[in-house]
Amino acid sequence: MKEDVEWKNQRERGAHWAFKLTVFCYKVLGRNICSLIVYPVATYFYLTGGKTKKASLNYLEKVYKHPEGKKLFKSKPGFKAGHKHTISFAFSILDKFGVWMNRISYKDIIFPNRDELVNRLGQKKGLVLLSAHYGNIEIMRAVSQTISKVPVNVIMDRKNAESFNRLLKSTNENFDISIFASDDIDISTAAALKEKISEGEIVAIMADRFTKGSSSRSFEKSFIGEMASFPQGPFVIPWLLKAPTFMFICSKKGKKYEVNCEKFCDVDDFQKIKRNVFIDNISSRYVKNLEKHCLKDPWQWYNFYDFWKKPEDETEEKLENNES
């Protein structure tokens, strides 16, 4: 997808040394001292990142123009708002380190509608979690580890999967997560994921960004006042696995982390509805839910590319061949 290539071509300018420095400081000095280092580093990336800065302001301006989002701004978003967005992203990375180093745990989480998800996982019944590049999805691990140490399986782009593995190993060599490359989804992978569900595990996937392994088919939905394209692939996964599906969003609230977990479908739903209708239903609910969070706190959504640019029409059929 065109915008995904654009995003990836922004290739971690200096990110390797920045991550290594941050991990070292976090381990040795703790979060508070590390924060003093992260702030100027993030500011540097903001000042020198022309494309990411432009994309951030484009997104924030859309929020500003929306009736529900305008109240968050005193004036049209400019340097200060974009900088705040970048700083929020930088500190979200610190929070990820905190989870993987076991510095953030269940006691730090506000989870008001937890019962259904917690009860299901406690009974060793698996599920699919749809999430987004919003807030701190790694909080999911803190939740799952509290509930009988439920394993988490993440589907992501191969390149990101390799980078993510290296990052996790640099923070905690004993991290317990299985990563499936989205461009390797075939019959055997689907069967393996279905077995994970049957064993009571979590299968998680981000649904707000195109990846190399995403289905070429996309759909358009109104998102923050304009039509935007979303990948269809992530919404095919629940249908393939015939698994209960929740949308999982975690946002930062002061020093706490608030989890919103909304159930989208249950096992019985797959017998009552056709595939295309099912995908349209859950994708519509997903987009509406994500929009609600972005309009409530726009600085916690981290897609730094032109999200509203229409993707190229490419042909990839790995997921499509397994949809029926």
Image (cartoon, rainbow, N blue to C red):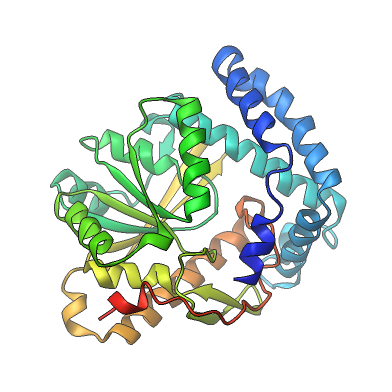
In front: 216, or 41? 216
x 30%, y 63%: residue: 245
Q: Is residue 320 left or right of residue 97?
A: left
| Residue drawn 61% across the image and 64% down it | 4
Residue 244 appears in the picture as rendered: no
Expressed as whole percent of the image width and height from the top left, the position of residue 275 reads: 29, 83
On-image quarter of the C terminus: bottom left
For residue 231, side relative to residue 91 (left or right) = left
Give me the residue at 48% from left, 44% from top: 162
Measured from the top left, where is residue 155 in percent x and y?
39, 55
Q: In the rendering, at what x and y percent does residue 112 appear?
A: 36, 48
The answer to which of 324 and 199 lies nearer the viewer is 324
User: Going by the picture, which residue comes out furthest to the top?
Assistant: 28
Q: Is residue 63 placed above or below 282 in the rendered structure?
A: above
> Left or right of 152: which side holds 3?
right
- Quadrant where the N terminus sits is bottom right
Q: Is residue 177 visible?
A: yes
- Across and down, in percent, residue 307 comes to 65, 68
In the rendered view, tell whether residue 184 sits above or below residue 317: above
The total of numbered circles placed on residues is 0
Locate residue 291: give its quadrant: bottom right
- Residue 282: quadrant of the picture: bottom left
